[in-house]
Amino acid sequence: MGRSVARLLAQKGANVVITARNVQRLEEALEHIAAGAIRKSQRFHFISADLTSSAEATRVLSETTTWNNDSPPDIVWCCAGSASPALFIDAPVTSHQSHFETNYLSAVYIAHAALQQWLKPSQKPSDTTTTTSTTSITPTTPIPLPRHLIFTSSVVAFYPLAGYGPYSPSKASLRSLTDTLSQELLLYPPTPTRPAVIPHCIFPATILSPGYIEENKSKHPITLKLEGSDKGQTAEEVAEASMKGLERGEEMVTTDFVGGLMWRSAMGFSRKGFVDTLVGMVMLWVVGWVRWDMDRTVRKWGTGKISDIKPKEVR
């Protein structure tokens, strides 16, 4: 997904920096991304780093800012992640740990480093003092466009299925973090010298990719049965749907119709629109039946009444 998102941003005229561990894959990805540029002046760069290290995340933001003529990036999109589905008790403790490190903490580290740059300690609000800027500001000085901090979660954050025990909690945590920052960042209103920061979270379902093939190798058959109606999307389709949601100003972005229904059934205190609320009221009646039906399927598997389960193919 990350490569497709970066290519799409390049096609919209952005300068792009990508990060991963494998240098060879970074070189190949950067060539693909740069081919989408619409202007000769666009610039592209990669940084090899392990984002499960907070020090590495800080280095990435620092190097990106230096490369970008000492200006911090306007958009930070956290796409790092992996899944090794298994029943909770079948997965070793190290698997639970690695899922949180890769899916949640890598995003936390890069987000923390980005917000440190964007909000600057000297501009943090105080309960007891008021900071007065010494910069020459006039009433007509425009407020700069907002910056965007984007996390990539999963629809399992709305309804975790059996067999995603190591994975779904790490993705649900990203939704919780987004909700927290959605309110916390109101402490930093935009000024002519400090843009607003808007958090977002993307919730794809199945992404048809080489990683998906690896996931199926460890999936329990009941998980394949429960997600059987999910036909999946290509990484390009997910990137396009994500971008459209972001351009509509959505804070929580789903990438297909069913994902949208799942989101509206589990909105809680997340920011939502009027239509979202109406659909959510209807979904309250639907989700009860869906849960009952899926629980019945799991019980049938437990008693040996289901066996005709095959993984979906990647198209």
Image (tube, grey):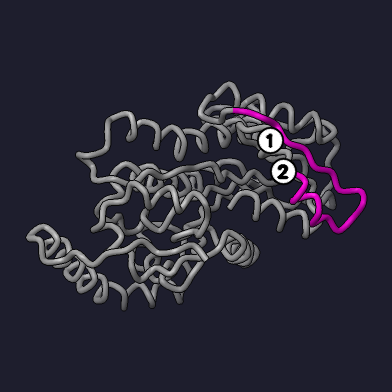
Residue 35 in the magenta stretch? The answer is yes
Name the residue: 50% across, 60% down: 208
Image position, residue 266 (x, y; %): 34, 62
Dot 1: within a 10 Å radius of its alpha carbon, few (fewer than 14), some, or many (20 or more) residues? Answer: few
Q: Which residue is disc 2 drawn over?
A: 28
Residue 85 in the magenta stretch? The answer is no
Looking at the image, the residue that sits furthest to the left is: 303
Region in magenta: 30-49
Q: Is residue 130 visible?
A: no
In the visual, does 182 lie left or right of 224? right
Image position, residue 44 (x, y; %): 80, 42
Picture disc at residue 24: 1
Looking at the image, the residue that sits furthest to the top is: 55
Q: Please determine whether, in this image, residue 254 is positioned above or below residue 77.
A: below
Q: Secondary structure at mark 1?
A: helix
Q: Amino acid at mark 1?
A: Gln
Name the residue: 56% across, 30% down: 51
Q: Please determine whether, in this image, residue 17 is positioned above or below residue 35.
A: above
Dot 2: within a 10 Å radius of its alpha carbon, few (fewer than 14), some, or many (20 or more) residues? Answer: few
Q: Secondary structure at mark 2?
A: helix
Residue toward you, 35 or 144 = 35
The image quarter containing residue 88 is: top left
Residue toward you, 158 or 72 = 158
Image position, residue 257 (x, y; %): 46, 73
Residue toward you, 197 or 243 = 243
In the visual, does 312 lie left or right of 302? right
Q: Circles 1 and 2: CB distance less than 8 Å?
A: yes
Image position, residue 167 (x, y; %): 36, 44
Q: Is residue 220 visible?
A: yes
Q: Amino acid at mark 2?
A: Glu
Name the residue: 31% across, 51% down: 219
Name the residue: 33% across, 67% down: 228
